[in-house]
Every structure is written in C-alpha cells, then in structure tokens.
Amino acid sequence: MAAEPPSTARKLATVGPAITETVVALGAGAQVVGVDDSSAPLAPGARKLGYQRVLSAEGLLSLGASLLLASKEAGPPTVLEQLRQSGMEVVIFANEPTVEATRHQLQEVARRIGREEQGRALSQALDEELARVASRLAPLDGGKRPKVLAIHARGAGALMVSGQHTAVDTLLRLSGGVNAIQGFEGHKALTAEAVVEAAPDILLVPVSTVKTVGGVEGLARLPALAMRKNWRVVTLEDGHFMALGPGMGQAVTRLADAFHPVQPGAR
C-alpha cells in the first residue's frame, strides 16, 4: 500500500534507529519530519534533532509533529514530560533485544500510525526469514560455530565490545555464531586482554567503524587487536549494533552466510 501523501498524513518524530526503520518499512517514511542523529541515514529528508538522550522540547515542538515514537534511551525525562504537557503524544518502547520484543514493537508501531496490515506483513516476513535461517543451521547441531567478537566505536578513539543481552548477541545466536565475550551484559571498553582471552575467529564491526579506523588493515594495527592474529572481518550496518528492527531477518541471513558459507552445489 502506498504511503499517505505528506500533506494529509500525521507528522511523526522518531527517536532510535529501530523505531525509524520500522516506520519507514511500514511505508510511512514521508510522515517523519524529525529524527535523532543515529536515525538520520534512514530518513534523510527529516530534520536532525541531535543525540537521543539530550533532546530539545523546542526543537521537537517546532516540527509540528503530533506523535513522538521513541526508544527508552530518549530523554531527558523532563523534555518528554514537557512534550506531553504541550499536547504531543509520546510513546516510548522498551528496546529489548529479543525476537519477541522486536515483533511486538513492530506491531505496536504499526497500530499507533494506523498501518496494522503492513505490520502483519512485516512480522510474517521477519518470522519466515528467521525460520529459513534456523532450518539451514539445524544440521550444525552443536557443531562448529565461530567465536565472534563484536566491536563498535563510541566517540573518538573509543572502541567497545558487546556482551550478553545486546542486539548483537541476539543476532550472533540466531545466525550460528558464538559471542566471544561472556560474563557481562551490555557494552564495555575493548582491551587487549579481553581480545586475547576471547580468541575470536571473526571480528564483527559496523561499516562506519571500519571506515573510521582505516579499513581492515587499520583494525589489525589497533593495539587492542594486534596481539590476536588469524581473525577475519565481517561488517554489518551500524543500526544493528544499537537495536533490533524489522531488518533483523536480513541481518541474520547475511551473518549466517558469512559464518557458514554454503558450498557450491549444496543448495
């Protein structure tokens, strides 16, 4: 179904790449008039509102949007309350890194913007793609699964690793990989000691981070990574390191292909 013409559609502000990705995938991208910085590549025609944790009430209200859809990282709380007091509908999503939460978020966003039919279609497509990957990986049955170290940049010169209960950890599990970092949840600073202990087969890195450090050669020269040899690099779009959205099925398929290449004639 085609998107509503912008002249008659409800204006939306979206904060968080998974939320923005969902609205665009539902066909309502033309309604998005404002996004946080991390969502900007997904909605290039929308005004950038800055970092999601330090939003401005004035900036949001000036857009004329009647609905703000945001992940739990959005803030500060005083700004969100000011928006509510000014008459804007504010809906916050938990941003939990599970398939079930992602499916629920997709359907709830669809309901909020009146695109339930598109939401059901997206949910079905997501389930089908995940099922195809699971079926393909089933013969592994505990067999060789590569140890993957997921790293990303946070600020100038700061590299982080992803532990459990993160979007990346879920993607690794679904795509037949093993998170090389165990024993903590969330993200922490990358250290040479952690890399040596993790002994990864693969480095999973956002596209932008690879560019920032000077490509694969630049990664190999980083002090925290130089002590570990014989790893290979797999890249993924930046948004998948932050949250799970309707594109997670495609991300899982891409990672499964990278971790477990299909031999010629095997399909």
Image: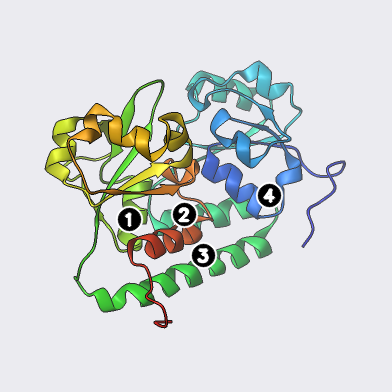
Specify which label sits upstream in the sequence, 1 or 4. Answer: 4
Image spot of residue 5 (x, y percent): 85, 48
Disc 2 marks which amino acid?
Thr
| Above or below: residue 225 compared with residue 171 | above
Residue ID at (28%, 37%) = 161
* CA separation in Å, label 2 and label 4: 17 Å
On the image, which quarter does residue 9 sit in? top right
Q: Secondary structure at mark 2?
A: helix
Q: CA distance from mark 3 to mark 1?
A: 16 Å
- Where is residue 47? Give x, y as percent: 70, 28
Residue at position x 56%, y 44% from top? 19
As drawn, the label of residue 113 is: 4
Label whose residue precedes the other's in the sequence (3 or 1): 3
Ranked by sequence position, the earlier of labels 2 and 1 is: 2
Q: Quadrant of residue 149?
A: top left
Please indicate whether residue 93 sits to the left or right of residue 196 in the image: right
* Coordinates of residue 201 in the picture (x, y in percent): 23, 52
**Residue 263 - label:** none
- Give the class, few, some or many, for how many residues have Cα within 10 Å of label 1's Cα (few <14, many ≥20): many
Q: Which residue is mark 2?
A: 102
Q: Type of residue at label 1?
A: Leu
Residue nearer the viewer, 15 or 167 = 167
Residue count near mark 2 (Cα–Cα under 10 Å), binned few <14, some 14–19, many ≥20: many
- For marks 2 and 1, give the one nearer the viewer: 1
